[in-house]
Image (cartoon, grey):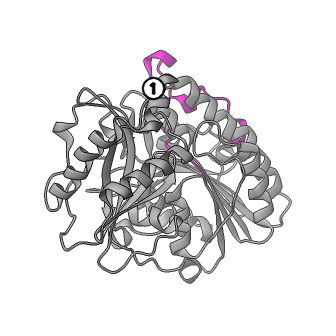
Amino acid sequence: MKFCVIIPDGMADYKLEKLSGRTPLEVARTPNMDNISSNGIMGVASTVPKNFKPGSDVACLSVLGYNPAEYYTGRAPLESASLGIELGENDWAVRCNLITANEGILEDFSAGHVSDEEAKLIMSMLNDKFADKNVKFYAGKSYRNIMVYSGDVTLEADCTPPHDIIGKPITKNLPKGSGSEILFELMRDSFHLLENHEVNKVRLDLGENPANMIWLWGQGKRPSLTPFKELYGISGAVITGVDLLRGLATYIGWNIIEVPGATAYLDTDYDAKAKYAIEALETHDMVLVHIEAPDEAGHEGNTHEKIRAIENIDRKIVGPVLEALEKYDDFRILVLPDHYTSISKRTHTSDPVPFAIYGTGCDNKSNLEFTESNAGETGLKVKKGYQLMSQFIKGNSD
């Protein structure tokens, strides 16, 4: 049996007045996703449990079949694994966004999608100025970087994700609680340091948003995840441009498939992701393909780009992968976003997400197109989202 999971990150959304009361998914041309849902099983799954913030870290843990209440320790430790950072027992990994601050307002959570090379230069300067036996910075991809704290203070502060406060005052959203002083001082001092960094002088000359401050959040300690093969008896591989999914794969014993042109942004190479996924299916039981583009468009409030990303995923990834799967005697494919990323709110929400499963053993046809509202109307609800993976593998939709 071959399995494929396709996650268009943040694809689900609310109905928009500018789209005549439809969602981006309803407007987008998605014949391949519609084929999967109409000829297979469709429903909704709660990937973000109660009392958890709606992030891809929690949601993707659920999608992979891991109960966040049991396994989740924070976002940054997962991303750290992707970067090869070995966390000690007492180390805290902290997500370090490069952001644009403007007159006390968080203007851009991604600093204009600063390049990898620019981020490396900035992380190097931060290490030169701030690194000691307790603090070290690591460059990741673009604005997504990591800080590791090894001191005696417990970093259990309540930290707000920067993509949740676009256009809002920084001072009203600073870390609060245990360890917040350490995080705040680094954030404050970074602004004074980065404001005149050579990278930002060039970016401003080019009319680009400067990476003039760090934002620290998503902290946690090293998790302990049971290997996927031990839980489900099958091997797996992941295709993604983001460190979060790469780190998750590392912890659960999956292979990471390197794909040229996988940028974790709107300009990602969709065709290459499909090509490498099809090849990976030859040597793995399950392949997960994650595409960040719809989520990025949602955070930017860009309706046109979100629709375009959904259509690209359907035409360039879902279609070719489904065609390749149908050559095997037994297969199943699962398509679902990890969470909602609302165009109107420009952030994540915890609503149950639509999912569709098609393939061997999926005899109950929904006969419906793949949309948020259709999925909600089928009556199939997976209240504990982490149980969907087991149902997908076993072919049980109850």
Note whether 173 is above or below 259 in the view shown: above
220 horizontally vs 62: left or right = left
| Residue holding disc 1 | 204
User: Residue sitting at 40 percent across and 75 percent down?
Assistant: 87
Q: Identify the secondary structure beneath mark 1.
A: helix
Side (left or right) of 40 relative to 64? right
Q: Position of residue 29 (x, y in %)?
A: 67, 29
Disc 1 residue type (three-letter): Leu
**In the displayed image of the protein, which residue is found farthest to the right?**
327
* Position in image of residue 335 (x %, y %): 61, 50
Q: Residue furthest bottom?
A: 230
Left or right of 50 on screen, residue 394 = right
Asked whether 384 or 241 is in front, the reply is 241
Count of marks, rendered view: 1
- Please report the residue visible at 60 percent of the width from the left and 36 percent of the height from the top: 266
**Residue 379 can be seen, yes or no:** no
Give the residues in magenta: 7-32
Query: Does residue 365 sit above or below 138 in this rendering?
Result: above
Residue 362 falls in image quadrant: bottom right
Membership of 10 in magenta stretch: yes
Instruction: Classify mark 1: residues with Cα within 10 Å, few (<14), some (14-19) or many (20+).
Output: few
Given residues 191 and 171, the one toward you in this image is 191
The reply to whether the magenta stretch includes residue 40 is no
Q: Residue at x 49, y 30 (%)?
A: 202
Q: Residue at x 52, y 58 (%)?
A: 243
Q: Is residue 387 visible?
A: yes
Q: Quadrant of residue 104?
A: top left
Place of residue 194 in the rendered image (x, y in percent of width and height, measured from the top left): 35, 40
Residue 350 point in image, percent of width and height: 36, 47
